[in-house]
Image: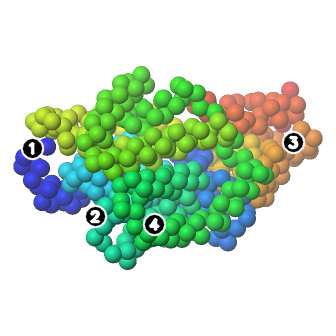
Amino acid sequence: MSTRVSAFVDQRPWYAVLAIIVVAAALRLWNLDGPSLWTDELASVAFARAPFHLLWSDWMVYETNPPLYYSLLGGWISVFGESEFAVRGMSVVLGLAAIAAIFLFARALHSTQAGVLAALFCALSAEQLGYSQETRGYMLGFLAATLAALSLLRIAHAWREGAAPARQLLPWYALYAGTSAVAVYTHTTFFILPVLSNVFIAWLWIFRTPRRLNDALGWVGANLVFAALYAWWITITLRQIQTGAETAAWIPTPTLRDTVAIVSHVVATRSFEIFNLPFAAAFGAVMAWGWWKLPLERRVLALVFAVGVPFILLAVSFVRPIFLERTLFWVQFIYLACLAVGVATLPWARWRPVLVAAIALVLIADSMNWSRVAHREQWREIATILHDNAQPGDAVLISSATGAVVFSYYCRHLGCEDVPVLAQATERGKRGLGEFFAGPELSVGNVAEGVGGYRRIWTVARTEDDPAPLLEAVATPEREWLNDETGRMRFTLWRVGAE
């Protein structure tokens, strides 16, 4: 940064952060309702519409994601409605709050300048932009994890200084316990957050403090509060492992290539194909320099999370695959903060503005390109085709009862709810969201009877979930109305009994 800009940032950092948040809001609100909601977003809305008492009961054993985000989204919908813009709006707000949180974290980690730079990089990151425009809980988890890490820094500083009475640390213990609880009730994989927090605090207490009993008791108390809050979902998770919530069964065991690609996306860019790795190497070098310039305690904290999160996710994935971009995403609070520290401590001060501009341009280009190539599913287009072309005697066949419930969102909003919906019978059956499907489930044994009262059947296929083979003995394809370039979504019309 130039001397004049640096002085302004140091004296009025929140003005700079506010300006960054305004730019970030414009990026996140632009075309927010442009793409159709995809399956996971539609599932979020369906869970948000479920009765509150079901979300916080044993009914959730068939859903791998905890209920907190769904409950908050339900309250949001009751105020703002369930349009595409509205249901994505909560993630936008969480994403903007995350920018303020990462400023606070990076400032505590190193300096005000590093905090402002981390906020800037967070605002422009394609990862942050993408998850801030998605009706899923990932931004809530990121926000909670960042604030939990901030509490660790404040606790570590107080322990090292030894000047603060134990009662003055209570707000930070409460912040750790509360935000960790929010995280684990947002996504099950956040169990890693308290595990690594305790690794860091144990190292700190043993090797870097006078090992005061009051400090240890305060930390134990915070963990007991967290454990009490977490206990219910732990029991649900154990039951899921035993009886099986199948919603995570599609995740593949990560290969070395998958692992490198996913890490490179979270560290740097996600949309530049072969250039993602060179950008990750360049960003990683700046992050490594920033990490090295930190004091020892903060360096250890950064290392514990930056390496520990992907390591644990990989280790667990050899038993039950969970290593995905979305499950690693939250550790960006460390990567972005270290990137900011690396820029702020660059030995050649005159080159710092150039490096800031270069990183910002890469992130902006990645975000804009990601908006063009991101995963899309044409549920809205399918419902529109159905509304415009369905005739009396038509029905829709979807690959599962859960899929039928998900599809009902667009039929409610686009006026195709009068077309009967059928579901292919699956092992999951009418469990979880599937319980809200009132129509029939078809299998090989009853398909002839199930479609016999209809003249035409529209089939909705999503990737490998295709109910069309079920119809091959009783119907013939008439026309393929939609088949996207990736083959993820196909919408086909069949004539029942036609030769």
Q: CA distance from mark 1 to mark 4?
A: 44 Å
293 over 481 or under it: above or below: below
In the picture of the structure, the residue carrying the numbered disc 3 is 443
Residue 364, horizontal then vertical, whole percent: 30, 38
Q: Earlier in the sequence, mark 1 or mark 2?
A: 1
Gap between marks 2 and 4, in whole Å?
Answer: 15 Å
Q: Residue at x 70, y 33 (%)?
A: 464
Q: Which mark is residue 216?
A: 4
Q: Dot 1 corresponds to which residue?
A: 2
Q: Is residue 283 left or right of residue 445?
A: left
Location of the C terminus by quadrant is: top right
What is the spatial separation of the Cα atoms under label 3 and label 1, in whole angstroms?
Answer: 69 Å
Residue 289 figure quarter: top left
- Where residue 125 is drawn, which disc sits there? none
> What residue is shown at x 70% (from left), y 30% (from top)?
479
**Which dot, 2 or 3, sits closer to the camera?**
2
From the viewer's perspective, is the residue at label 1 or at label 2 nearer?
2
Mark 1 residue type: Ser
The mark nearer the N terminus, 2 or 4, is 2
Q: Nearer the viewer, residue 491 or 61?
A: 61
Of circles 1 and 4, the one toward us is 4
Separation (CA) of disc 1 from disc 2:
33 Å
Q: CA distance from mark 4 to mark 3?
A: 59 Å
Q: Quadrant of residue 307?
A: top left
Q: Residue at x 56, y 54 (%)?
A: 191
10 Å crowding of disc 4: few (<14), some (14-19), many (20+): some
Residue 99 point in image, percent of width and height: 33, 54
- The answer to whether the residues at label 1 and label 2 have Cβ atoms under 8 Å apart is no
